Image (tube, rainbow, N blue to C red):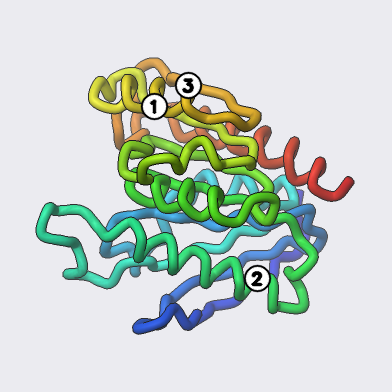
């Protein structure tokens, strides 16, 4: 059990906007995970809160970001993936400048549209990203050629009832050339809110990040 926790509200410069964020750091950290959610309007409660709490109990810091201000969705009802990628990158740059986190391996937990942006960033930054966990991902929006450039170990998690994304994620899994794993969670929809499902996602994410943040220290 983590005895102490450093909690720091942040504002990170990301070009034309400043992102709100919160950094949670256990007393002893083996890495830090940036949460990349591609939906607007998460100002009140950070998304994936249960997953984040499980990571922190395993000595992994977490950085939550409000990547999209309300009203920024594009004309097609989805965000600009390139813009999300730039903002996640700005957060990773901040972690590298921050004295407490500069030496820690960085992992990315991407959901939905944020997962596409996490893939783009991992493809661009190579070994600077230690691991990816992508839940309910839209890898088809990451751009042509992106998947083959990702070197970070990548875990894809899809709900068994999310028929629209199972095939898309299977294709992405086939295109990845890194260490990879593909998990379909029976009974889960795209929201992953069914009883017992958040615990399954959290266990998978925790195991993946612990395995690969430890490897990044070697």
> Of marks 2 and 1, which one's residue comes earlier in the chain?
2
Residue 191 quadrant: top left
* Badge 1 element: helix
User: Label 2, on which residue?
Assistant: 95
Near-viewer residue (30 or 75): 75
User: Label 1, on which residue?
Assistant: 169
Mark 2 and mark 1 residues within 8 Å of each other at the beta carbon:
no
* Quarter of the rendering occupied by the C terminus: top right
* Badge 3 element: helix
Work out whether 15 lies above or below 211: below
User: Label 3, on which residue?
Assistant: 174
**Disc 1 residue crowd, few under 14, some 14–19, many 20+, Cα 10 Å:** many
Residue 205 quadrant: top right
- The extreme front residue here reads 145
* Residue under the point 33% across and 39% down: 138
Work out whether 184 lies above or below 145: above
- The extreme left residue here reads 75
Near-viewer residue (196 or 130): 130
- Viewer-nearest of labels 1 and 3? 3
Work out whether 47 lies above or below 193: below
Residue 101, numbered label: none
Q: CA distance from mark 1 to mark 3?
A: 9 Å
* Badge 2 element: helix
Mark 1 and mark 3 residues within 8 Å of each other at the beta carbon:
no
Say whether residue 136 is left or right of residue 30.
Answer: left
> Of marks 1 and 3, which one's residue comes earlier in the chain?
1
Residue 150 quadrant: top right
Mark 3 and mark 2 residues within 8 Å of each other at the beta carbon:
no
* Residue under the point 38% across and 66% down: 67
């Amino acid at each position: 059990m983590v005895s102490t926790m450093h909690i720091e509200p942040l504002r990170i410069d990301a070009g034309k906007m400043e992102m709100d964020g919160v950094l949670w750091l256990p007393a002893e950290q083996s890495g830090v995970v940036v949460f990349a959610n591609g939906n607007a309007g998460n100002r009140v409660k950070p998304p994936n809160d249960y997953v984040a709490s499980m990571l922190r109990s395993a000595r992994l810091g977490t950085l939550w970001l409000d990547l999209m201000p309300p009203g920024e969705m594009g004309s097609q009802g989805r965000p600009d993936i390139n813009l999300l990628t730039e903002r996640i990158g700005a957060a990773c740059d901040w972690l590298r400048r921050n004295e407490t986190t500069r030496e820690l391996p960085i992992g990315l937990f991407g959901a939905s549209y944020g997962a596409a942006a996490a893939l783009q960033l991992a493809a661009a930054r190579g070994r600077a990203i230690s691991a990816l966990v992508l839940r309910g991902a839209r890898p088809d929006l990451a751009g042509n050629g992106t998947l083959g450039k990702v070197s970070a170990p990548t875990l894809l998690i899809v709900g068994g009832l999310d028929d629209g994304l199972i095939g898309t994620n299977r294709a992405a899994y086939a295109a990845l050339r890194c260490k990879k794993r593909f998990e379909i969670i029976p009974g889960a929809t795209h929201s992953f809110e069914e009883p017992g499902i958040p615990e399954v996602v959290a266990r998978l994410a925790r195991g993946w990040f612990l395995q690969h943040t430890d490897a990044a220290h070697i």
